[in-house]
Amino acid sequence: MSKQRALVWFKRDLRVHDHAALAAAQACDDALAIFIIEPEWLQSEECDASHVDFALGCLAELRSALAVRGLPLLVRVGSAVQVLAQLHRELAYTQVLSHEETGSGWSYARDIQVAAWCQSNQVAWQEFTQTGVVRRLRSRSGWAQRWQARMDAPLQVLQHGFTAATRLEQPALPTLATLGLAAHEKTLQTPGEKAARRMLASFLQERGFDYRKALSSPLSAEEGCSRLSPHLAFGTLSLRTVHQATEVAIRQTPERSLAYALRGFAGRLRWHCHFMQKLEDEPRIEFENFARVCDGLRESDFNEAHFAAWCEGRTGYPMVDACMRSLRATGWLNFRMRAMLVSFASYHLWLHWRPTGVFLARQFLDFEPGIHWSQMQMQSGTTGINTLRMYSPTKQAVDQDPQGLFIRRWVPELARVPLPYLAQPWKMEESVQRMAACTLGVDYPCPIVDEKQALKAAKDRMYGLRQTQAAREESSAVQMRHGSRKSGLPPSGQRRKATPQRSAKRAVQVPSMPSSQGDLFS
C-alpha cells in the first residue's frame, strides 16, 4: 500500500479546534500544513494591509499551536498552483485537505485552477464544510434544516499529535514590509484563536446581557456586540463553535434577560450563512446587480467629488462622518451604522454600490465577501426583493447618539457645538458658529447635498422602477432563488433539553484548548 501524505491547506480557517481538515490528516501516514500568501489576494481591490496584518498575527499563534501538536506550518508567498506544484515536487504528497471557501472572485478562479492541477497530477483534493453554506444548492427549501444539522454536529477534535509529520525548515513569517505593503494606522482587535475564545466567553457570560438594545448605537455596540466578526471572517473560531456555545449559554443562563438577548444573537448566526449562500449560488453578484433591471440606474451618474467626501468623512452630515472616521480608525462599525453609510452613499449621493463596496471592504477587518456584497446590494436597493431602507443621517444622530458623545469623539471640529445643533450644524447662526469655534465651510463642511431633496429624488427613481412590470417579474425570480424561507425550527435554546449536569452550571465556560477531550463546552 502506498504511503498517504497529506497537505493541510489553511485558508480562512486559522485555528486548531473544530478543524475538519486537520482531523482528517491524522488518519494519514504523514502530514504537513501550509498557508499561502497569494499575490492575487494582496493585489485584489478589497485587500487592505490591516487584513494581512491580522492574518499574520493569527498565523504566528497558529504555527505555535500546531508545533505543540507536532505539525509544522509552512507559510509561502506565491500563486496557489505554483506553490502547491513546488511542494509536490519536494514532498510528493498524495492529497490536499482544506475547507470550502465562499470567497471573492479571485479565490473562486483560484479554486478552479487548483482543482484542475490536482486532477492532472493525481492529487486528491478533499474540501470540508465549515459553515452552513451548501455547495451546488438546488433549492432554498429545507436550507434552514440543513444549516441546523451542520451546526449541531459534533465538533471536530484532534485525537492525538502528529508524530509522523514531515519535518521541514520553517522560515520566519513575512512582514508587511517584505510583502511590499505599507504600514496601516488602524487599531485592530487582537488576532488569533485564544483572543477569539476569550471574546466569545466574555460575550456569552457578561457583555451580551443587553445585546438587542446595544447593537444599534455605535456607542453601546462597541462593547455590547459580540465582536466576533473578524474571528469568523478569518476562521479563528468556527461558526459551529459559536453556535453550540450560544445554545448552551441560553439553556444554562438563569437571567431571563440574558437568555432573551442571546436568542437574538443566535438568530443572526443563521443569517450569517443565509447571505453567504447568495454569493455561493450566484458569484456574479460581487460585480453585477442582483436585479438586472437596475443596470444603468447609477453607473452613469457617479459623482467622484461626492465619493471622495464620503470616503474621507467630510460630507457635512456629522453622524455619517463620525461613523466613517471611526471605521477607518478601527476596522469595525456596528451593523446599523454600516447600513446608514451605504444608504447615504446609495440614495443621498446616488453612488453605485460597487465602488463604495470596494472602499468599505478595505476598511472592514471582518470583510466577508458573501455577506458584504449581499448587504451592499440590499442596502442600495438593487436586489429587487428587499424593502428599500433609506436612513436619515440626522434622525440616526438623534436616535443613536442623543448626547453627541460619538460625534464629538470622531468629529472634533464639532466638539464645542451646542447639542441642539450637533446633528444639524448647518442650522447654526453665525454667532453660534463663533462661540463654537466652528465656521461652516471652513472648519467643517456644509452638507454636500440637501437631505430632503436628495432623498425625494432617490425615492422617485427607485419606486418608479419597482412599479414596472419588468421589475416585478424579475423580483419573483430573485425571490425563488435567494429569498429566505420559514424554517419551522423551534427557537434557540429549546431544541435540546439541558442535561442535569449542564443545568447545574451558571455560566458557559470556554476553557483553554483541550486537544483530545469531547465537547469543548460540556
Image: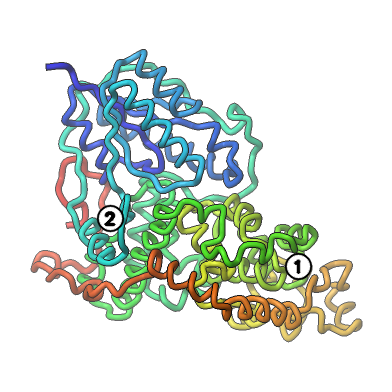
Q: Quadrant of residue 257?
A: bottom left
Foreground residue among 402 and 416: 402
Task: Tell me how far mark 2 sits from mark 1, CA to CA.
Answer: 41 Å
Residue 7 percent coordinates (x, y): 30, 27
Residue 453 percent coordinates (x, y): 76, 81
Residue 286 percent coordinates (x, y): 53, 53
Residue wearing tag 1: 315
Q: Secondary structure at mark 1?
A: loop
Q: Measuring 85% from the left and 67% from the top, which residue is drawn there?
A: 443
Q: Is residue 52 above or below residue 356?
A: above
* Amino acid type assigned to the residue bearing label 2 in the image: Arg
Residue wearing tag 2: 240
Q: Quadrant of the N terminus?
A: top left
Q: Quadrant of the C terminus?
A: bottom left
Foreground residue among 34 and 104: 104
Residue 202 percent coordinates (x, y): 36, 61
- Give the total number of marks visible in the rendering: 2
Mark 1 neighbour density, 10 Å: few (under 14) some (14–19) many (20 or more) = many
Residue farthest to the top, as pictured: 90
Q: Is residue 316 left or right of residue 107?
A: right
Q: Quadrant of residue 421?
A: bottom right
